[in-house]
Image: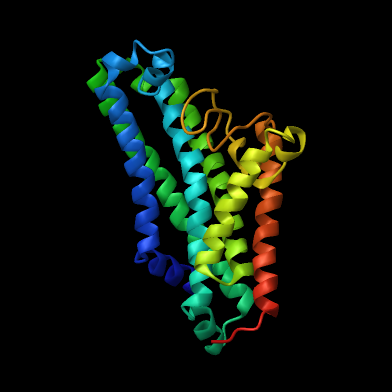
Amino acid sequence: MRLLVAGARKLVRRPATWVTFGLLVGLMGLIFVAIGATADRVSTQAQGAAALALVTFPRAYDGVLSFVLGLGGLLAVIYGAAIAGSEWTWGTLKNAVARGESRARYMVVTFASVTVLLAVGVVLAFALGVVAALVGAVLAGVPTSGLNDATTLAALPEKLLRGWIGIVEQGALGFAIATLARSQVAGIGAGIAVYFGEQFSAIFFPDVVKYLPFNAAQAVVDLPSGGGFGGEGGGGPIVSSLEPNVALIAVGVWLVAAIAVSALFTERAEIGG
């Protein structure tokens, strides 16, 4: 618990934490406000109705969540890689080991701290995204009567929990890649390459790719197609997706595997510098 609290406090002060959160909230805010501000022109275009639906409640809740899961998933890969890579390049892992900390335990607890920050980030980003969608609705002159839709609000906690698990799994993949690379820059670059490589390969191998980590993470929440970042659940051209409960199992397997790889590699790696 001591390491977890210390790790979370350390991550709060990291620029990577604020940059990642700021990018997610900033881009969402710009998109929703822009939709509302250009409602007159958007409504005359072929996809105008779909765009305005993003600021029409209660569907706007799913639109915001789709952005958080899609764009947030990519940012989680980068964030996980940045945190894991810094443990090697900044020498903090070496210092922890010198103090007598277990290597594997230190890396597991470090990632546990990442999951705490991701949980806070998901909730805050969703809340601020809803505010941005509400501002967009007011600018567009769209009725906001669906803001307090009881059925939608009742389903939100489970959707947010599932979404957080999916984002944590994507962060774990970035964490594991950077651990294997033992570098921030290499880990972030490789993590982004793997992320987009999987999305593009979905066009050619949909029946296989849907079980892979990033596509599975995007399928853990049952969201309507056509809304948010990247369409159905966000993140890329998903040709075929898993049923949400099956996706949740796949995500759990990838998450455990990623953390196990990180811990085992760190346990056996030579820590120099």
Q: Residue at x 67, y 79 (%)?
A: 269
Q: Seen in the image, is 186 located left or right of residue 64?
A: right
Instruction: Please determine whether, in this image, residue 263 is positioned above or below residue 101.
Output: above
- Give residue 176's position: percent from left, percent from top: 62, 62
- Give residue 22's position: percent from left, percent from top: 33, 50
Q: Residue at x 23, y 22 (%)?
A: 139
Instruction: Please determine whether, in this image, residue 47 is positioned above or below residue 222.
Output: above
- Give residue 172's position: percent from left, percent from top: 59, 57
Res 215 visible? no
For the image, the number of numbered tags is 0
Q: Residue at x 59, y 58 (%)?
A: 190
- Give residue 109's position: percent from left, percent from top: 55, 68
**Quadrant housing residue 150:** top left
Q: Seen in the image, is 202 located left or right of residue 184?
A: right
Res 218 visible? yes
Depth check, front residue: 144 or 83: 83
Instruction: Please determine whether, in this image, residue 133 is positioned above or below residue 116.
Output: above
Check the image and tell me how it is coloured: rainbow
Q: Name the outermost residue toward the top.
A: 44
Depth check, front residue: 230 or 251: 230
Depth check, front residue: 208 or 223: 208
Q: Residue at x 43, y 17 (%)?
A: 50
